[in-house]
Image: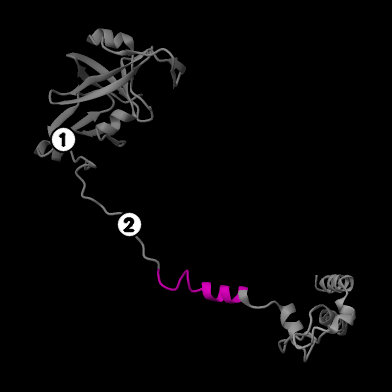
Amino acid sequence: STHNCVVTIHGHDTRVLFDGGACVSVCSPQFLQRVGITDFDPVSSIGIQTIQGRAKVLGEVRGVPICFGERVVFPVSCVIIDAPFDILLGRGFMEAADAATDWKRSAYWMYSQDYGIFIDATGKTAPLVYRKDSPEWRDLSPPPSIHDMDHIPALSRTPAPGTRQEGVGPLLHENQTPSAITEASSDSSDSTFTTEANSSDTDTDPDITSTTTCAASALEDIVPDPDSSSDSDNSPSSDPDTQDEDFLFAQALFD
């Protein structure tokens, strides 16, 4: 069943419903008429979604005095709709009352500046209202109010040195290292690619060696020797069409 309890509103005992999932508190026009509240703002162009479907908003009333016991009063603003109940207190009221749900006892704990309220949410007993510094309140073993808690600073974590940044240097060095093709082409003394194999590796396939040597020779024609003069325009490699064909041939070999 819906959590509820009996409160006093303008001297009338009224059963209120609690719904922490409701975005607004709502009440019926019949309830307002019964407790003598006539000052409200009429609204006719909006609606709200209820569990029964969309409901037309008839108006809004502010400052409805919800009295627990004889000491604690919470003023509540409500949206007026045609409802089968008197008043339903939603999330805004729960936050204002610093409400905490006690699922084991089917109860609510609420707090004002000086008082604590224990509400049997089954509606079988009246709310208990005590001063927060009284022994009766302490005997109920209430959870602490968020306003009474000591300030807890936000957790901070200092990253351990050398964890995230230690891999940045090698990564940058790797990205700046010339590619294998550039290294091979810049070495004029040996135009054949060589790979140092482990002792457990098998012998190099002669076909692979021949193909690699061929590719390196093609690269010699593509990449000019930095020591050579610029007067070698008559060489075959100076032809742009020949350069493109040789480069595509070398690229196909390595792909």
- Residue at 81% across / 85% down in the picture? 204
Quick one: quadrant of the C terminus? bottom right
* 197 relative to 222 in the view: left or right: left
> Is residue 106 something that shows in the picture?
no
Do the residues bearing badges 2 and 1 touch, measured as CB atoms within 8 Å?
no
* 12 relative to 45 in the view: left or right: left
Query: Quick check: is 167 in the magenta stretch?
Result: yes
Rendered image quadrant of residue 254: bottom right
What's the residue type where badge 1 is placed?
Answer: Gln
- Residue at 24% across / 20% down in the picture? 63
Rendered image quadrant of residue 132: top left
Residue at the front extreme of this rendering: 231
**Mark drawn on residue 161:** none
* 101 relative to 205 in the view: left or right: left
> Which type of secondary structure does the marked residue at label 1 adopt?
loop
**Which of marks 1 and 2 precedes in the sequence?**
1
Marks 2 and 1 sit apart, C-alpha to C-alpha, by 29 Å
> Is residue 92 something that shows in the picture?
yes
The residue that mark 1 highlights is: 113
Which portion, as a residue range, is magenta?
160-175
**Mark drawn on residue 155:** 2
> Which type of secondary structure does the marked residue at label 2 adopt?
loop
